[in-house]
Image (cartoon, grey):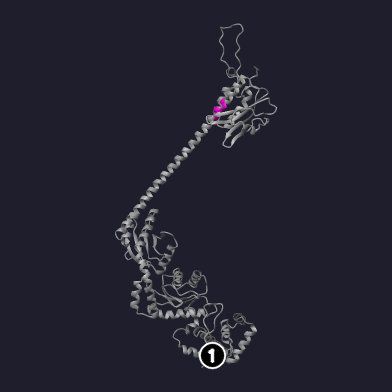
C-alpha cells in the first residue's frame, strides 16, 4: 500500500504537538491528552462541522473539493449540482483546473464512473446522492488509482458532502414552507376579513331589499317609499316633482312652507344631477332623479346637512329611487296617451282658446302655463314630417329648456317653450342630431298669457320666413332682431303690399317675365350687399361690368334714381316684400330650403 503524507484542511484548524514521553521512566509517567491531528489525521471531523453548518450548496461542494487534496495525491477537477435543467457546474476554486467534458458526465446517467480526463491515468466522478436521488458530482483525478484506504477516505468525503447537501436542501425547503405557510395565513386572514365585510354588506343590502319589497307588496306609494327610506337611513326623505314642488316627506324638521326655487335654478340643478350616474350631493341634499325612460318624473332626496351618508345610505337611496320609478311607471305610460293631449293643447293654443280652459288642461298635463313662453318654429328640408323628426327636435330642446309643448304643422315642428333658446344652441344640437346644417328656426317674442300665443306663432313664422329668404338661410332668427321686417308682419293687407311692390318694381317684374332676365333679383342682391359692387357681383356670380350694365338698365326701365336715399329705401323694402312676403326671387341652388318663384299679375 502506497503511503501519502496527510494534508490539513485549512489554517483555521490548528495542529497540536505530540506529547513527548520521558526516556528514563516507562509505565510510571502519565500521557498528556492526545492531539486533534492524531485523532483526526485527515481533518474529516473539522470538515463535517463546517459542511453541516453551511447553508449554500455551491459552497458545500467547493469546501469538499478543497479538501480532496488533504486525503492523498488527489485533485478535485470539477463539482456539479443537479438542477431542474440538468447538471450545473460549480464555479472552480482553482483557476488552473482541467476542463471536464460535461457531455461525458451526462452520459453516466446518474451513475459513478470515469470521465476520461486527458493526461490523467485515473479519474472518477463520485455521485453526491440523497434521499431524492442524485444531488451532484465531484470529479477526482490522480496519477494512479487509490488504494483501499484512499477509496474509503474519498467515499467518506462524498458521503459527508451528500449529507450536508441534503441538510441544506431540507433547510431551504423548510424556509420555503414557512414562507408559503405565512403567505397562506396572510391570504386566509385577508379573505376572512373580506368575507366578513361582504357578509355585512349583503346583510345590509338584504335589509334594504326586504324593506322596499314589503313596501311594494303593500301597494307602494310615494309616502310609503319615503317612510321606508327614512327608517333605513335615519335621514329625512322627500319626493319633489320636476318643478320643485313637494310631494312627500318623511322624518323630522319638515319645512313649512316648502322653499320655492326659481325655474332657472331648478332646471340647472336637474341638469347638474342628470350629468352624473347615481345619487348626487347638492348642498345639504343627496338627490336621485326618477326617470324610468329618460324623462325626469321627479326627485327623490335625503336631507344630510351633517354629511353623514355612507355607501350604505347611497345604496338605499338608489334602490328606493328604483322602487319609486317602478311605482311611477304607470304614470309614464299615461304620458304616451298624454302626448296626444299635449299636442291637442298646443294646437288649440296656436289657434286661440280661452285662458281658463288652457290653464286647467296644461296643469292636468303637468305643464306650467303661468310662466313666460316663446313659440319656436323649426323647418328642416328633407326630413319627413313624422315622429322621428319631432323627437329629434324635442331632444335638442330638452338640453336648453324645460320640456316644451310640441306639435307638427305640415313639414314644420312648433314648440311652446318656457325658456328662450340660446342663440344657435338649438340649431347646433339639431344639426348634430339630423346630420345636416340646412335648417332654419324662427323664435317669437315673449308671451305672458295664453291669449298672446297665436300672435307669437305668427311672429315665429315670420322670423322663419325671413331666415329662409336671407343670404344665410340656415340658422336661428329671433323676431326681436328683425328690425324693419317686423312692420311686414301679420296684419298687413296683402293687396296693399302687392300694390306697393307693383308701384316700385312693376316695370322690372314685367321686363323679367317677358325677357327671362333677373333685374329684380339683381337689385335685391345689390341692396343685400349694402351697395357693394364686388360683393353683389360675387353673390350673383357675374362680372362687375355685367352688374353695372344691369343696374343701368334698371335705372332706365324704372326711371328711379338709385342714388336717392328715399328711393333706395323704398326699392329695398319693395324687393324684400317681393321676396319674403310674396315669395318672389326663385330658388337658390345652394340651399334646399328656398321658396318657389312668384310673378305678380300686371295692373
Reply yes or no: does residue 504 show up in magenta. no
Q: Is residue 253 visible?
A: no
Quadrant including the N terminus? top right
Local SS, label 1? helix
Q: Which residue is mark 1?
A: 504
Residue drawn at x 38%, y 69% as measured from the top left: 336
- In the rendered image, is residue 579 in sight? yes
Q: Viewed as shown, does residue 70 lie left or right of 432?
A: right
- Quadrant assignment, res 561: bottom right
Q: Nearer the viewer, residue 358 or 411?
A: 411
- How crowded pointer 1 is (Cα within 10 Å; few <14, some 14-19, many 20+) is rated as many
| Residue located 46% across and 37% down the image | 181
The spot of residue 379 in percent (x, y) is 48, 76
Please identify the dominant SS of the magenta region: helix
In the image, the segment drawn in magenta is 159-165
Residue 151 appears left or right of 325: right
Q: Residue 310: give x, y in percent of width and height.
A: 39, 53
Q: Residue furthest left?
A: 218
Q: Quadrant of residue 515?
A: bottom right
Q: Residue furthest bottom?
A: 603
Taking 325 as reference, is 171 above or below it? above
603 is higher (above) or lower (below) than 420: below
**Residue farthest along the right direction in this orientation:** 119
In this view, the residue in front, 5 or 270, is 5
Residue 168: percent from left, percent from top: 54, 31
Total marks shown come to 1
In the image, taking residue 154 as reference, residue 277 lies left or right, namely left
Q: Position of residue 202 (x, y in %)?
A: 37, 50
In the rendered image, which quarter is residue 49 located in?
A: top right
Amino acid at each position: 500500500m502506497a503511503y501519502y503524507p496527510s494534508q490539513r484542511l485549512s489554517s483555521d484548524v490548528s495542529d497540536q504537538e505530540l506529547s513527548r514521553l520521558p526516556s528514563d521512566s516507562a509505565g510510571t509517567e502519565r500521557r498528556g491528552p492526545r492531539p486533534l491531528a492524531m485523532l483526526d489525521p485527515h481533518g474529516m471531523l473539522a470538515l463535517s462541522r463546517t459542511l453541516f453548518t453551511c447553508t449554500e450548496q455551491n459552497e458545500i461542494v467547493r469546501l469538499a473539493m478543497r479538501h480532496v487534496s488533504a486525503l492523498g495525491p488527489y485533485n478535485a477537477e470539477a463539482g456539479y449540482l443537479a438542477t431542474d435543467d440538468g447538471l450545473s457546474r460549480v464555479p472552480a476554486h482553482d483557476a488552473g483546473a482541467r476542463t471536464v467534458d460535461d457531455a461525458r458526465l451526462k452520459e453516466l446517467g446518474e451513475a459513478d464512473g470515469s470521465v476520461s480526463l486527458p493526461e490523467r491515468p485515473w479519474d472518477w466522478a463520485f455521485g453526491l446522492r440523497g434521499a431524492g436521488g442524485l444531488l451532484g458530482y465531484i470529479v477526482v483525478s490522480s496519477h494512479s488509482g487509490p488504494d483501499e484506504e484512499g477509496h474509503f477516505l474519498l467515499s467518506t468525503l462524498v458521503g459527508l458532502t451528500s449529507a450536508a447537501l441534503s441538510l441544506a436542501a431540507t433547510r431551504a425547503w423548510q424556509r420555503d414552507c414557512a414562507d408559503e405557510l405565512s403567505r397562506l395565513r396572510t391570504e386566509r386572514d385577508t379573505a376572512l376579513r373580506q368575507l366578513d365585510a361582504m357578509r355585512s354588506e349583503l346583510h345590509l343590502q338584504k335589509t334594504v331589499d326586504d324593506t322596499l319589497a314589503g313596501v311594494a307588496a303593500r301597494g307602494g306609494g310615494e309616502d310609503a317609499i319615503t317612510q321606508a327610506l327614512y327608517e333605513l337611513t335615519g335621514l329625512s326623505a322627500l319626493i319633489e316633482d320636476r318643478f320643485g314642488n313637494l310631494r312627500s316627506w318623511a322624518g323630522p324638521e319638515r319645512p313649512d312652507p316648502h322653499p320655492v326655487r326659481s325655474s332657472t335654478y331648478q332646471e340647472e340643478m336637474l341638469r347638474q344631477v342628470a350629468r352624473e350616474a347615481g345619487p348626487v350631493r347638492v348642498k345639504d341634499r343627496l338627490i336621485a332623479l326618477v326617470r324610468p325612460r329618460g324623462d325626469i318624473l321627479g326627485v327623490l332626496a335625503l336631507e344630510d346637512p351633517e354629511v353623514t351618508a355612507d355607501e350604505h345610505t347611497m345604496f338605499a337611496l338608489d334602490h328606493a329611487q328604483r322602487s319609486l320609478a317602478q311605482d311611477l311607471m304607470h304614470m309614464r305610460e299615461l304620458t304616451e296617451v298624454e302626448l296626444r293631449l299635449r299636442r291637442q293643447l298646443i294646437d288649440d293654443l296656436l289657434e286661440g282658446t280661452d285662458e281658463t280652459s288652457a290653464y286647467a288642461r296644461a296643469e292636468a298635463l303637468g305643464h306650467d302655463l303661468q310662466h313666460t313662453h316663446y313659440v319656436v318654429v323649426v323647418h328642416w328640408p328633407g326630413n319627413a314630417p313624422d315622429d322621428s323628426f319631432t323627437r329629434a327636435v324635442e331632444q335638442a330642446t330638452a338640453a336648453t329648456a324645460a320640456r316644451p309643448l310640441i306639435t307638427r304643422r305640415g313639414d314644420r315642428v312648433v314648440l311652446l317653450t318656457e325658456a328662450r333658446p340660446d342663440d344657435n344652441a338649438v340649431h347646433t344640437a339639431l344639426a348634430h342630431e339630423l346630420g345636416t346644417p340646412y335648417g332654419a328656426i324662427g323664435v317669437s317674442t315673449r308671451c305672458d298669457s295664453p291669449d298672446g300665443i297665436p300672435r307669437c306663432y305668427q311672429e315665429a313664422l315670420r322670423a322663419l320666413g325671413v331666415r329662409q329668404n336671407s343670404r344665410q338661410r340656415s340658422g336661428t332668427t329671433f323676431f326681436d332682431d328683425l328690425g324693419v321686417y317686423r312692420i311686414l308682419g301679420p296684419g298687413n293687407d296683402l293687396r296693399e303690399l302687392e300694390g306697393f311692390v307693383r308701384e316700385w318694381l312693376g316695370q322690372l317684374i314685367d321686363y323679367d317675365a317677358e325677357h327671362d332676365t333677373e333685374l329684380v333679383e339683381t337689385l335685391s342682391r345689390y341692396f343685400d350687399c349694402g351697395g357693394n359692387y364686388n360683393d353683389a357681383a360675387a353673390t350673383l356670380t357675374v362680372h362687375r361690368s355685367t352688374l353695372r350694365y344691369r343696374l343701368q338698365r334698371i335705372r332706365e326701365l324704372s326711371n328711379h334714381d338709385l342714388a336717392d336715399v328715399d328711393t333706395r329705401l323704398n326699392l329695398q323694402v319693395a324687393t324684400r316684400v317681393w321676396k319674403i312676403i310674396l315669395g318672389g326671387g326663385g330658388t337658390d341652388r345652394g340651399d334646399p330650403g328656398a321658396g318657389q318663384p312668384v310673378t305678380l299679375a300686371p295692373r
